[in-house]
Amino acid sequence: MDVTERETLDGHLQELRRGTVVLACLRLLERPGYGYGLLEELAARGFETDANTLYPLLRRLEKQGQLTSEWNTDEARPRKFYRTSPQGRQLATVLTDELRAIAAAVDALPGKE
Amino acid sequence: MNRPIDREHATGTATTPARVPAGASTAAATRAADLTARYVDAAMRTVPEAQRADLAAELRASIDDQVEARIADGEDPHSAERAVLTGLGDPDRLAAGYTDRPLYLIGPRLFLDWWRLLKLLLAIVVPAVMGAVALGGALDEDPFGAIIGSVVVTGLGVAVHLAFWTTLVFAIVERSAGKDAAPFAPWSVDKLPEQQDSGRSVAELVTSLVLLAVAAGAVIWDHARGLVVTSQTDESFLDPSLWPTWTTGLFVLLAAEALLAVTVYARRRWTTPLAAVNALLDVGLAAGVMWLYSQDRLVNPEFFASLVDEDAAEVTSIVSTVLLFVIVGSAVWDAIDAFRKARRAGPA
């Protein structure tokens, strides 16, 4: 695969994965988590994300009311912990259902190997 | 696009992200404080005051976490910090992500409105101003080079001003309107452009033939009877020395134009070669008129002398100049218009 092909593929994959990071965050933050920890967990679970994408995303979701936040000062380093709000939980359910519907629709498409 | 932190590092520490011993961080953090502090400061510069402290603390903690994870994997503190900050990228870009600020001057929502308005303004205002400056210079009898110079300079200046102020207003609107605001006016099918006339209708043929005949007739009438027959004058408007050589040249041009109009009608369309012939005829006309103007042989000096008592020479000069501009302007427009119609009609 040459460089342009590689870039085209990366572009398509990125496009396809874009919305799934939001879904993954909303589901993972049922248990409170902070920026870097969430970044690692996302990567471990196959939702590889850039730090400079994730951090602003958390802020945005909080502003929309999908997440709530709280500073935890118990440890030596104070960290801001995010948690999915009831509204965010609803959104996660809708997104999950939608993703399943898309997967089913893709399975039903002709032209599979 | 920045690549995320190495996958190996990520999976290695993923299960225990919060359990890095606090003590291990302090030494590294002190040594590395300089670059990170500068990064956080740079990122906070464009963040609104109210969010600054909270965001700075969070960003700082996130960076320290990432640096620590790398150190725990055996990297030296200095290069770990550099790698993390490099991964985060330009701090202003990161801040724009936090604050939802656009990283473009005019986005897709307003681009078409901006582009259409700018093209319209440039197409109308610049030629109008240039024409006015040229006419003013000619009426003042400025030297030819000075007129060209001031026309070019004014044209450029006006174009730059139009582009700058239009763009500035749109950039401000882009930043003041809500992110999801609609374009100025939503598009509808009613806005589809009409299918443009490509210069092949009978009406157009008749119009051009009639106009050419009227032009030729006016020149003959002017020579034979004088343009306006009053009790005061029967002098011709055009310089009498133009008859017969120059006027014959004009009739040849007019006949060629008529032939061209018939050809365009017969071919049912303008083509690029036909437009080129048309442009040649226009250049011929414009060049002839400009030559006569430079020789003061366009308008009969006796014509105004017999109509007004004073300043006849000045009136003659002004009328000649205006006539020159009208004829040359129409010739230029006619030449351009034919090429536009040829292009619209598409390849032959």
Image (tube, coloured by chain):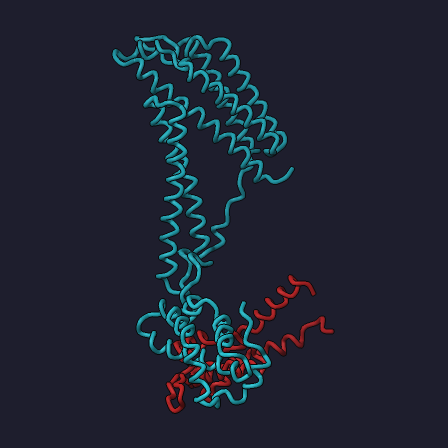
Chain colours: A red, B cyan
State the image coordinates of residue B101 (x, y, percent, origin top left): 40, 65
> Could you say which quadrant of the image residue B60 lies in?
bottom left
In which quadrant will I find the N terminus of chain A?
Answer: bottom right
Q: Nearer the viewer, residue B8 or B259?
A: B8
Residue A100 appears in the rendering: no
Total count of labels: 0
Q: Is residue A7 above or below residue B241?
A: below
Residue at 35% from the left image edge and 11% from the top image edge: B303
B72 lies left or right of B142: right
Residue at 57% from the left image edge and 31% from the top image edge: B275
Q: Is residue B239 above or below residue B328?
A: above
Residue at 56% from the left image edge and 40% from the top image edge: B344
Q: Residue furthest right?
A: A113
State the image coordinates of residue B289 (x, y, percent, origin top left): 46, 19
State the image coordinates of residue B69 (x, y, percent, origin top left): 51, 83
Q: Nearer the viewer, residue A39 or B129?
A: A39
Residue at 56% from the left image edge and 31% from the top image edge: B202
> Could you say which quadrant of the image residue A14 lies in?
bottom right
Residue B43 appears in the rendering: yes
State the image coordinates of residue A41 (x, y, percent, origin top left): 53, 84
> Could you say which quadrant of the image residue A8 lies in?
bottom right
Q: Nearer the viewer, residue B31 or B110?
A: B31
B312 lies left or right of A30: left
In which quadrant will I find the C terminus of chain A?
Answer: bottom right
